Image (cartoon, rainbow, N blue to C red):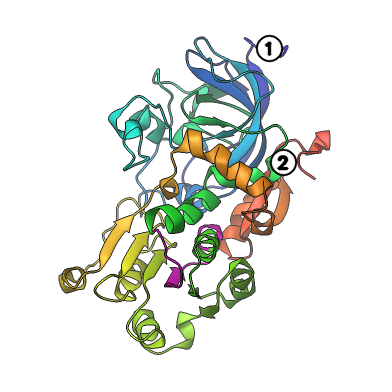
Amino acid sequence: MMSTAGQVIKCKAAVAWEPGKPLSIEDVEVAPPKVHEVRIKVVATGVCHTDWENLYETGKGMKFRPFPLVLGHEAAGVVESVGPEVTNFSPGDKVIPLFLPQCFDCDRCRSPKTNLCRKNWANAQVGILADGTSRISCNGQQVYQFLGVSSFSQYTVVSDTSLAKIRDDAPLDKVFLLGCGVSTGYGAAVNTGKVEKDSSCAVFGLGAVGLAAIMGCQIAGAKRIIGIDINPDKFEKAKLFGATECVNPKEHNGNIQDVLVEMTNGGVDYAFECVGSPAVMTAALESTIDAWGMCVIVGWTETEAMNVVVEKILMGRKLTGTYFGGWKSVQEVPKLVDDYMKKKLKLDEFITHKLPLDQINKAFELLKLGQSIRALINLWPEENNPEVA
């Protein structure tokens, strides 16, 4: 155990005190891990659109979560100490925290049909761990842990079923992306959609998740991959990941789905909605061909409804969703890390900005303006950490 084991650690964190307000860098206290919990030093974290939505769109498309909270759920770090009854982790292990657990014991974990383990799920959704409390506090006040992770803190505590141990030579400032965005988009194509060789695909939304979906379509052997976004600045990057062409809906009269149906002589084989907009979800479904078209909803919204014309389904199209790309998190994230190390997956190309923790609000702004794909947040800039070059 490290010298801080069993002690409260004081460190920096970006705290969201209330909805709609910028994050505030605070001195927080992180309590030691309890039974089946692990405390980790967070080395690198990304700013994901879901973090932005929970801060600035709470109560709109997102369910309300209690404040104050520490956001952040896409990260990589090193185990600092472990709580009682933890057997799979040791101090010094490189790890990726997971907002989707894998307990290996429940019916869902034992089924090959799903990755949706529900271990501590309800608690994590409202920012608390298994015992009903958070391990992070600020000035004596409990601070909730977003999705049970809270990676916008230099240290955090997570459940041992919500943590993946990865190889020692993995660069944490790259593989943190496998904690959310890249795994989600890539898995949507290869696991959920099961894209076939020589097929045609449309990917709506060219952020990190959409680009990862394009990468998945290319790796699966799709012949035609159409990227769709209202920001043409993203087209060059989309083609780097495998898009064969890109379309800006603003440059066309009428519905984008009609444009795609005409372009593809009847519709694409697979469509991936990576925006989180009900209107775009409808467009994605209607861009697929009848008889066998598959539409996968990847973009996140919790409270809104999409419009489906029943005939579109009756004529043989399939509509489905994906969560974390269908990956069984604890066992498959390390395999994704291996694939990156073997150069089978791109990760470096997603990172467009590198910022210290005290500039995290700039990262949120870049994301909202569509100027970044992923901003890497270095939580320890003063250490000149070689893990974050």
Whether 84 is drawn above or below 44: the answer is: above
Decide whether residue 201 is among the magenta residues: yes
Of helix, strand and loop, which one carries label 1? loop
What number is the disc on residue 1? 1
- Segment tinted magenta in the rendering: 194-210
Residue at 49% over, 61% down: 213
Q: Residue 24: horizontal and vertical position, in percent?
A: 61, 40
Q: Nearer the viewer, residue 388 or 131?
A: 388
On screen, 41 above or below 90?
below
**Amino acid at circle 1:** Met
If the image is split into quadrants, where does the N terminus sit? Answer: top right
Q: Quadrant of residue 311?
A: bottom left
* Earlier residue among tags 1 and 2: 1
Judged from the image, the secondary structure of the residue bearing numbered disc 2 is: loop
- Looking at the image, residue 6 lies above or below residue 278: above
Q: Nearer the viewer, mark 1 or mark 2?
A: 2
Q: How many marks?
A: 2
**Residue drawn at the location 39% of the way across and 39% of the way down:** 65
Quadrant in which residue 175 is drawn = top right
Q: What residue is at 36 percent from the left and 28 percent from the top?
A: 119
Quadrant hosting residue 321: bottom left
Q: Nearer the viewer, residue 248 or 182?
A: 182
Q: Residues within 10 Å of mark 2 (few under 14, many from 20)?
A: some
In this view of the protein, can residue 71 be seen by the observer?
no
Q: Position of 171 compared to 335: left or right? A: right
* Rendered location of residue 281, percent (x, y): 34, 66
Residue 173 inside the magenta-drawn segment: no
Location of the C terminus (image quadrant): top right
Q: Residue furthest front?
A: 197
Instruction: Give the numbered dot on residue 171.
Output: 2
